[in-house]
Image (cartoon, helix red, strand yellow):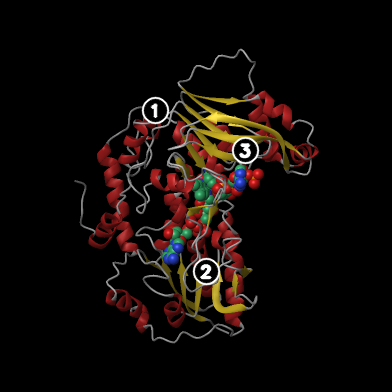
Amino acid sequence: MTLSLRVAIVGAGPAGIYAGNILNRQVTEAGGEVAIDLFESLPAPYGLIRYGVAPDHPRIKGIVNSLHEMLDAGTIRLIGNVEVGRDITVDELQERYDAVIFATGALRDAPLDIPGIGLPGSFGAADFVAWYDGHPDVPRTWPLEAQSIAVIGNGNVALDVARVLAKHPKDLLSTDVPANVVEGLEASPVTDVHVFGRRGPGHVKFTPIELRELGEVPDVDVIVYDDDFERAANDPHAEQLFASNNQVKVMTRTLNGWRKPADHEYTASRRLHLHFLHAPVEVLGTEAVEAMRFELTRPVGDGSVEGTGEFVDVPVQAVYRAVGYASSPVNGVPFDDARAVIPNEGGRVTDAAGQHLPGVYATGWIKRGPVGLIGHTKGDALETITNLIADATAGSLPAALVDAAGGEEVFALLDSRDVSYTTWNGWLALDAHERSLGEAYGVPEGRETVRERVKVVPRDEQVDISRDGSLVVS
Ligand SMILES: Cc1cc2nc3c(=O)[nH]c(=O)nc-3n(C[C@H](O)[C@H](O)[C@H](O)COP(=O)(O)OP(=O)(O)OC[C@H]3O[C@@H](n4cnc5c(N)ncnc54)[C@H](O)[C@@H]3O)c2cc1C
Ligand SMILES: NC(=O)c1ccc[n+]([C@@H]2O[C@H](COP(=O)([O-])OP(=O)(O)OC[C@H]3O[C@@H](n4cnc5c(N)ncnc54)[C@H](OP(=O)(O)O)[C@@H]3O)[C@@H](O)[C@H]2O)c1
């Protein structure tokens, strides 16, 4: 059977783009044809690569180059600045497309339900990340008034947040970080950033390169505490992980390398402290954050920990919880509140009764939860697209009802609602504009080349540049 499909993908992060690319390749290689529209609520593509990956990780941001090629090939049509569920409904998509794939990722912080978490000075990592990465929908100023800061969590997001908070802003100047972020960080009086894990050094969720990078931040000392390592000792589960998992082995060695004799003199002007076996209990303060209370924990031997009954209060003026991201529901699609994902089997979205919803799919973080690297979204996409093609081949996709008029009808619908959608050509204009801002900035001190780009932050400015294409550096 030769396929002829119209497919909408919702979300232009890596998962959505990989899904579009794999779908196009598989259908056309089999002699079929497919028209793919990629809807994105932001004016620009790339999801968390643009608005999550830390600015001082340009190598990772470089993955954008291969995603750019996929979108530039002309086989996937980007329709940006359109929020599905608000600007166009899921029903309206289903009427116009044979299949709809949700790749809406995760944007917000998972909750940390402890007393005091709502005090001024207590923040979610996702909000801070969105601020320093220039997300258009967060305020442009950030209260950086704390000298000592607690970061809760032992994942890579905690490391990103701690590193950006501890780093001297001049060391961010070669990146795409927006000007207001550099100004904000320059005003920060921070001297000490404390990162707390509730489990031991053998159970961190960091990755080796990201952990090692902490030790390379200029004028920032990394400090670990013998007491934590002693409580973590003789844990058969950690020992078994150390023996079987190379990443754990490498990270344990990195962490042990930071242990120093009691009389060691630290010389940097800022310090990054890594604490283990500290479970967050309460954020203390009356008007604002004054301290963070932890219960010391010890390993049980099966990978989990138990409280020791001993509590410590660490004086801090700000707390950042980095205990994971959480996805948001999209109006008109089932959502599993407990797992914060769209319920699915192999990417086929299921309803409350566990039945597949014909023609509705999910991929990426919204499919399996907010864990995993960009590369993992490729495997997700492959599984989802394989199942979609199997369904299409079996004839079980519902037929689109609205005459697509060569694909133009959807634009008429958006125009009728005054939705200022952006396109791939619009992104090329915005991309060129941001690169020219980078060039206009000149060569940052201590670097040999100009900045690759400086991000445009306000949504309306991004939309104007994308839709006009003629705005130049002012
Ligand atoms: C802070 C942070 C840093 C990270 N750093 C790295 C790293 O250095 N290296 C690495 O490999 N991985 C990193 N990751 C993981 C990586 O970002 C994810 O694996 C990946 O982005 C998940 O892809 P996704 O496409 O599922 O979701 P996302 O990247 O979140 O993309 C989802 C897209 O859907 C859009 N969307 C949502 N709702 C709607 C809607 N209703 N209508 C239209 N569009 C919608 C969003 O705007 C977004 O663009 C990081 C993650 C975080 C949180
Ligand atoms: N540079 C990079 O490659 C990079 C950068 C950022 C993010 N990412 C990826 O993006 C994904 C998400 O990262 P993430 O850091 O948000 O999530 P994560 O890797 O799942 O880490 C979450 C951390 O929060 C802790 N936590 C959860 N609930 C807690 C609670 N109630 N109290 C105390 N601690 C709690 C977890 O501890 P437990 O382990 O005890 O549950 C864990 O240490 C990961 O796959 C990550 O590798 C990659």
Residue 444 vs 423, above or below: the answer is above
Q: Is disc 3 in contact with disc 2, using a CB cutoff of under 8 Å?
A: no
Mark 1 Cα shell of 10 Å, populated few (<14), some (14-19), many (≥20): few
Chain-order first, disc 3 or disc 1: 1
Residue topped by disc 3? 197
Mark 2 near ligand 1 (CB under 8 Å)? no
Which residue appears at 33% of the width and 47% of the height?
Answer: 455
Q: Secondary structure at mark 1?
A: loop
Residue 243 vs 362, above or below: the answer is above
Residue type at mark 1 is Pro
Residue 296 horizontal side relative to residue 462, left or right: right
**Measured Cα–Cα span from mark 1 to mark 2:** 52 Å
Q: Is disc 3 in contact with disc 1, using a CB cutoff of under 8 Å?
A: no
Residue topped by disc 2? 25
In this view, the residue in front, 205 or 285, is 285
Q: Quadrant of residue 444?
A: top left
Nearer to us: label 1 or label 2: 1
Numbered badge on residue 189: 1
**Measured Cα–Cα span from mark 3 to mark 2:** 43 Å
Residue 308, position in %: x, y?
72, 34
